[in-house]
Amino acid sequence: MNLVTTPNLPDPDALYAELAAAHRGLRPAESAALNSELVLILANHIGDAEVVRAALALARA
Amino acid sequence: MPYDYRPYPYSPPPGLTTPEGPKPVIVIGAGPVGLAMALELAGLGVPVTVLDDNDVVSIGSRAICWSKRSLEIFARLGVGARALDKGVTWQVGRTYHRDVEVFRFDLLPEDGHRMPAFVNLQQYHVEEYLIEAALAHPLVDLRFRNEAIGIDQTEDVAHVSIRTPDGEYGLRAAWVVACDGARSPVRGMLGLDFEGEPFEEHFLIADIEMQAEFPPDRRFWFAPPFHDGQSALLHKQPDDIYRIDLQLGWGADPEVEKAHDRVRPRIEKVVGHGDFRIDWVSVYTFQCRRLARFVHGRIVFAGDAAHVVSPFGARGGNSGLQDVDALGWRLAEVVAGRAGPGLLAAYDRERTFAADENIRESTRATRFLTPAPGGETDLRDAVLRLARKAEFARPMVNSGRLSMPCVYPVPGHDDARLPRASRPGAVAPDAPQGAGFLLDRLGGDFALVAFGEAEPPEAAGVRPLVAEMNDHIRARYLGAEAGACGLVRPDQVVAARWVGTPEPDAIAAELAAIREGRA
């Protein structure tokens, strides 16, 4: 499976708002902890190291 | 009871007065690896001279976790039963975050093996058993207080300069095996350096004697309530001795931390009382590094002299014994003239491959234990928190992946229809055979083992063997096939295997490739 880099969410504004809201009121360390857990949960859900590697490369680019 | 460190007798070696003839093999260092090396070679008919600068066993428990493979090697060397009787047997590792268990592993979830997954046994006991076996063996010449102080070599011979309480002398040898430990003086004499990564983190290691009903399981804690924010490891040993490893952090001063009045309150918090005796304390940092090559002309390195790893994974002493496994029969073949020195290149190839695997595994565990500040620590802590609430994160919790024998990338004939457990490059899996076990019948020579409906063909230089059929043999060697044959090396590693019965020519070709060091 290839990393999807084209729009893939039915309502991107709504999900973005939910992700952003999750950080509201958090201190930087708490936000970092939340994001770290999220990365691990999503990586496991994807279940394909190649896709996660491609995502990592895109994030670092 | 504290261990009774008795000195072994020194006697002036003959070389002090009259030059001695050349030796087939000199082993430098009488730790577990050097002693095992000597017994292995002697068992294969090769006379061995062992030099050690000291005359007592190692001080402190040091290497304590002996793997199933090490126990199988000990059995071959004649000390397996003693190690098993004395040691604390375990196979389950339990890992906690704060006070909640987040991961559990079982290192031997199947039966039908003679040896358990692990025993815990202090290094001094192991050395004592090996020394007694070596002293009793007519082919082992064990010389205490004989310190190797110089070494040089030509193409054909190595020369070792030796210091004793009565003066200095020299010995020549066709081969020298350096088993002189992590700070190997021989490595220094040859001007060789380790390549790899040192770690800054300090750990406190303590043996305490106390009466307790702790389970034999390996127990590891991340951020336990009894050791503020750091990690802790607890192992049970014989003689009511417990091993405690405590992470101290980067800034720790070893001299300060070793003081008993400093150690005692830390241990009291771990065990919940003060009713114990401190037997041994050390503070250590560690490295995950190795020599670029293990064979340097006539001088061959094994054990910590060749490679060092962090202790989380029990890959130090155990991998040293696997070096002995891979080197002993090859050196014996070369000494006997049945193979050229090219065979030792295969030792170098297999054991540097294994060292890389051990270094990779122990480096990963060490990084998980001691993540860099910032995002790496965030990620590590996230794994620990997730492991409390989601199953997927539990196998990511890494407190050390324990030593299993390496599966070598050998090119011998294979058939993918047969079970993966017995593929070429793997140690032949054990299985019950009559009143004994399969591994008792393998080792020391090349064997061709027939399983199920197969006949072992006659082939020169190979001992034919018919395995008794049972469910374990079927699961580990046959799968759905009716018959199969496996060629097993003297170190009990499967070299090649076939469905049905192979042609004698095919076996001869495999043997030739092995002896020439190509396989």
Image (cartoon, rainbow, N blue to C red):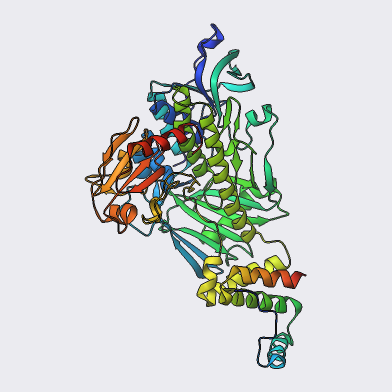
Instruction: Tell which of B518 and B217 is nearer to you.
Output: B518
Determine the residue located farthest toward the right in the rendered image.
A61
B302 to the left or right of B495? right
Residue at 40% x, 38% y is B489
Instruction: Tell which of B446 and B291 is nearer to you.
Output: B446
Work out whether B218 lies above or below B98.
above
A19 to the left or right of B79? right
Work out whether B158 lies above or below B247.
above
Residue B414 horizontal/vertical position (percent) = 41, 49
Kindly indicate the quadrant of the structure image that contains residue B182. Answer: top right
Count the labels in the image.
Answer: 0
> Can the viewer see residue B239?
no
Residue B24 horizontal/vertical position (percent) = 49, 19
Residue B201 horizontal/vertical position (percent) = 68, 53
Kindly indicate the quadrant of the structure image that contains residue B436. Answer: top left
Instruction: Tell which of B147 and B302 is nearer to you.
Output: B302
Work out whether B24 lies above or below B247.
above
Residue A55 horizontal/vertical position (percent) = 68, 73
Determine the residue located farthest toward the left in the rendered image.
B434
> Can the viewer see residue B316?
yes
Residue at 70% x, 30% y is B191
Quadrant containing the N terminus of chain B is top left
Instruction: Tell which of B489 and B3 is nearer to you.
Output: B489
Residue at 64% x, 22% y is B149
